[in-house]
Image: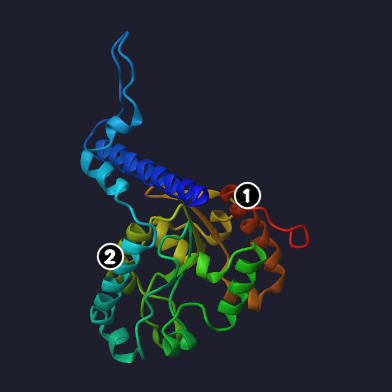
Amino acid sequence: MQGSKGEMESQLDRKLRRALLQKLKSLQRSGVGQLSRRVNQPVPPAEDLISEEDEREAMTYSPGGNQASQLAIMGKEVEACIKCHELATTRTQTVFGVGNPDARLCFLGEAPGADEDRQGEPFVGRAGQLLTKIIEACTLKREDVYILNILKCRPPGNRNPSTEESENCSEFLHRQLDIIQPEFICCLGSVAATNLLQTTQSIGKLRGRFHLYRGIQVLATYHPAYLLRNPPAKRQVWEDIKLLMKEMGIEIPAKHA
């Protein structure tokens, strides 16, 4: 019971910190450049910057439960989506996402391929098998993380998503991440990274360091499909993954490190 209690308190702290960060960002958007204090007046504790509503939400937080139901409802919305006519008329089914709804880490790809379109689950083809090996080398399982894509439908011929398609699907993507509230996101490939971070920088310039998305730490690296075509790049990806695991506080076994 003690371990369970400690885990709940840790997750509650995460929720409060996220609420605080969102509150500070809201103040910044409204034109507040800094929080000043008067002489001899103590700085209010961080909790005072969080609204009662935010705190109530954190206190009633149930790991995995509420997120799972919200994601399930949203998945039905995605199934009914016809914003992109070509994708809606050529898909076998939508590919929403899979994994732990309370995951600390999300892996974000670009779009479903043929295998994913057929099975309704992201990263199940050859590239997905390689991703699974990477996850397991970090002492994790696919069930521990959450895996999703920029697009929820397969583009014909596995082409890259168009700008319009990415924009149409962005609402679902942002809502998914808002529900899961991961601490870390690993962008797999340039399409995922440039869309999430709203940048034009190449994956080569983005990788190897952390970026921020709504207070979440983001690491970009090469897509597993790229590694299948360019095996030497596996070394660079593994360096990125080790950096990610170090930041997460996860120790990689010596045989993999």
At numbered mark 1, what does the secondary structure look like: helix, strand or loop? helix
Q: Is residue 37 visible?
A: yes
The furthest residue to the top: 40
Q: Is residue 189 visible?
A: no
Judge left or right: residue 8 versus residue 44: right
Image point (30%, 20%), residue name: 36
Judge left or right: residue 114 versus residue 71: right
- Decide which of tag 1 and tag 2 comes sooner along the chain: 2
Figure disc tally: 2
User: Which of the numbered marks, if any, corresponds to residue 246?
Assistant: 1
User: Which of the numbered marks, if any, corresponds to residue 111?
Assistant: none
**Mark 1 vs mark 2: in front:** 1
- Amino acid carrying mark 2 in the image: Glu
Q: Which sits in the foreground, 97 or 171?
A: 97
When the figure is inspected, residue 97 is found, relative to residue 10, above or below; the finding is: below
Give the crowd class for mark 1: few <14, some 14-19, many >=20 residues within 10 Å.
Answer: few
Rendered location of residue 92, percent (x, y):
36, 91
Give the crowd class for mark 2: few <14, some 14-19, many >=20 residues within 10 Å.
Answer: few
Image point (37%, 49%), residue name: 214
Rendered location of residue 174, percent (x, y):
32, 61
Image point (56%, 77%), residue name: 128
Judge left or right: residue 87 versus residue 201: left
- Amino acid carrying mark 1 in the image: Lys
Q: Which sits in the foreground, 170 or 175?
A: 175
Measure the alpha-carbon separation of dots 1 and 2.
Answer: 31 Å
User: Which of the numbered marks, if any, corresponds to residue 171?
Assistant: 2
**Quarter placement of the C terminus:** bottom right
Image point (34%, 67%), residue name: 68
Quadrant for residue 74, please give it: bottom left
Rendered location of residue 45, percent (x, y):
34, 26
At numbered mark 2, what does the secondary structure look like: helix, strand or loop? helix
